[in-house]
Image (cartoon, rainbow, N blue to C red):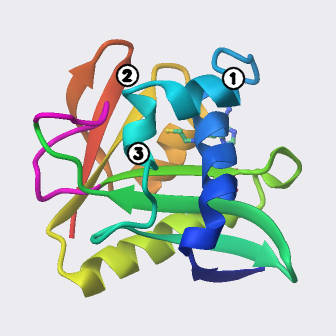
C-alpha cells in the first residue's frame, strides 16, 4: 500500500468515500445522488480541489483502497464537525474489503503530517454515535471530543 496526494481527478473516489462515511454502519441512509445534491453534504467536496483543500489516497498499484480529505469550512456554511474557520474538517473512508488492515491509520497519520506541513493549527471531524471503529482510530491519533452536534461528537486534534 502507498499513499499519494489526492488531486482534482480523485473527486469521484472521494464522493464514494464520503458516502461510506455517512453510511458507516452498512445501512444505505443516503444515496450517492443525495450526498452530491444535499446543500450540507456537498460542502465537503463541491469544487474539489479548491485552494486550501488537501488529502491523500491509499493505493495498491492503481487500485484505490481509501481516501482522506480536509477542507476549511466557514462559520456561515459549516460542516457537522465545525470548530473554527481556520481549522479544516476531515473526512475519510476505506473500501469495505480492506478495513481493519491499517489503511485508515496510514491515511490519518499522513493527513496529520500534511496539515502540519501546511501550517494548520488543528484538524476537526464529526463522528456519529456508535461508529466505534472510527472513534478508536481517531483517539489513537490524538483526537479528543470537544463538542456535540445532533447524534455526533465533534473531535479536535491540535497540531
Ligand atoms: C473508520 C475507517 C476509515 C477505519 O479504516 P481502517 O482501515 O479500517 O482502519 P485501521 O485498520 O487503520 O484501524 C481500525 C481500528 O479500529 C479497530 N476496530 C475495528 N472495528 C472496531 C469496532 N467495532 N470497535 C472498536 N474498534 C474497532 C481496529 O481494531 C483498529 O484498531 P487497532 O489498529 O488498534 O487494532 C473504516 O472503518 C471505514 O471506512 N469505515 C466506514 C467509513 C467511516 O466510518 N468513516 C469515518 C466517518 S467519521
- Residue 143 visible at all: yes
The label number, if any, that marks residue 4 in the structure image: none
What span is in magenta?
76-88
Relative side of 33 to 59, left or right: left
For mark 3, give the secondary structure: helix
Mark 1, residue position? 31
In the displayed structure, would residue 3 be above or below residue 154? below
Q: Observer-nearest residue: 158 or 34? A: 34
- Residue 156, given in percent of the width and then of the height, sits at 24, 48
| Residue depicted at x 64% and y 35% | 19
Image point (68%, 54%), residue name: 12
Among the two numbered marks 2 and 3 on one chain, the one whose residue lies closer to the N terminus: 3
Q: CA distance from mark 2 to mark 1?
A: 20 Å
Q: Does the magenta-highlighted stretch encompass residue 118? A: no
Tell me how far mark 3 sits from mark 1, CA to CA.
16 Å
Image-based side of 102 in relation to 40, left or right: right
Amino acid at each position: 500500500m502507498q499513499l499519494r496526494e489526492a488531486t482534482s481527478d480523485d473527486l469521484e473516489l472521494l464522493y464514494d468515500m464520503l458516502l461510506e462515511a455517512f453510511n458507516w454502519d452498512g445501512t444505505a441512509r443516503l444515496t450517492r445522488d443525495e450526498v452530491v445534491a444535499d446543500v450540507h453534504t456537498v460542502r465537503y467536496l463541491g469544487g474539489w480541489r479548491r485552494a486550501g483543500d488537501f488529502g491523500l489516497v491509499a493505493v495498491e498499484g492503481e487500485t484505490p483502497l481509501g481516501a482522506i480529505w480536509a477542507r476549511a469550512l466557514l462559520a456561515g456554511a459549516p460542516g457537522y464537525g465545525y470548530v473554527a474557520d481556520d481549522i479544516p474538517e476531515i473526512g475519510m473512508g476505506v473500501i469495505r474489503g480492506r478495513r481493519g488492515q491499517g489503511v485508515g491509520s496510514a491515511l490519518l497519520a499522513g493527513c496529520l503530517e500534511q496539515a502540519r506541513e501546511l501550517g494548520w493549527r488543528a484538524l476537526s471531524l464529526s463522528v456519529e454515535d456508535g461508529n466505534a471503529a472510527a472513534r478508536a482510530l481517531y483517539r489513537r491519533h490524538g483526537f479528543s471530543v470537544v463538542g456535540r452536534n445532533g447524534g455526533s461528537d465533534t473531535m479536535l486534534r491540535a497540531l
